[in-house]
Amino acid sequence: MSAVEERTVTEDEADIRLDRWFRRHFPGLTQGAISKLCRTGQIRVAGRRSEANTRLQPGQAVRIPPPVLAVADTEPPRPETVVDARLVKDLERMVIYRDDWLIVLNKPPGLATQGGPGITKHLDGMLDGLRGDMPVRPRLVHRLDRDTSGVLLLARTPGMAAKLAASFRTRTVEKTYWAIVKGLPVPLEGLIDQPLTRVQGLGGARSAIAHPSDPDSQKAVTEYETLDHAGRKFSWLGLHPQTGRTHQLRVHCSAMGNPILGDVAYGGESEMDTVTGRLHLHARALKLPHPAGGTLTVAAPLPAHMEETFRQLGFVAPALETPRWKR
């Protein structure tokens, strides 16, 4: 049997959970096996017994017991990934910011972020095309609905993914969405604090405003402001979600009586012939703590269908700001 080994946690692996650290280094190891090895004290961090959810710090020594090393010895080599040159070009056109730690894309509407039932093409399955000279593929930090366009953040290493995900969990990321909605909100700005739940419908599960007694309800808060309006028929809103529930902005706008234009699922059927069927929701900007220090602010241009609707309604978007990393 293989002897015990120790490996040192790197700077890039700061704040990663112990079980995820093991799955990264030993892909053949199951979650159940990791939990059992932690419970029996065979896996240790800095010489101490540790839980599977322990978050690691750079410089700590992780004890690798013989059963883990035995699994590693039997794992076949990973096949080399072959990336389509056309795919790389498609992805490069989406890039609006890149540095040694992260990549920011302007995701087009209609492209799913991740796979699911009936989804064969999705961004997560394309990310090897942005690997470049890095030893690993970039990782998604958050998600956007398939029909929502705009700013999408990728981490270039697993350690950076953990740091950036922590920023989203602790709500230190400022998110700005633009939406064109039906009608004119009253009041013109405010806070929507209505919990959400998941319900089953003819088309599958969807989000809805939760009943006060619903034990499965999740807190959902959205700040909104009216940036412009075309009479009382259509309005351009700035949306700032304080939580990140599924379809939160779409449900909150609908509940306010102002569904997003083109959002058939939540009552926003289009009344404009040129944009029928297109969701008018765009992740305009992110402001976040950069993992290397300072603050990064980045914005994405509008998709073509929203540009056309802005033109028709007489809305004038401010000039797109250049990405700024203020150290």
Image (cartoon, rainbow, N blue to C red):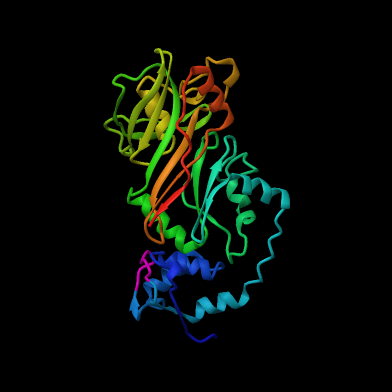
Q: Position of 216 compared to 32: left or right? A: left
Q: Quadrant where the N terminus lies?
A: bottom right
Q: Position of 95 compared to 285: left or right? A: right
Q: Is residue 207 visible?
A: no
Q: Is residue 55 shown in magenta?
A: yes
Question: Does residue 9 sit above or below 98 in this rendering?
Answer: below
Q: Residue 212: name its quadrant.
A: top left
Q: Is residue 121 visible?
A: yes
Q: Nearer the viewer, residue 13 or 78?
A: 13
Q: Residue at x 34, y 76 (%)?
A: 49
Give the magenta part as a residue range: 50-57
Q: Residue at x 46, y 20 (%)?
A: 267
Q: Residue at x 37, y 29 (%)?
A: 252
Task: Find residue 135 and report its horizontal and vertical position in percent.
Answer: 59, 67
Q: Is residue 227 shown in magenta?
A: no
Q: Residue 14: name its quadrant.
A: bottom left
Task: Find residue 188 and report its horizontal and vertical position in percent.
Answer: 31, 22
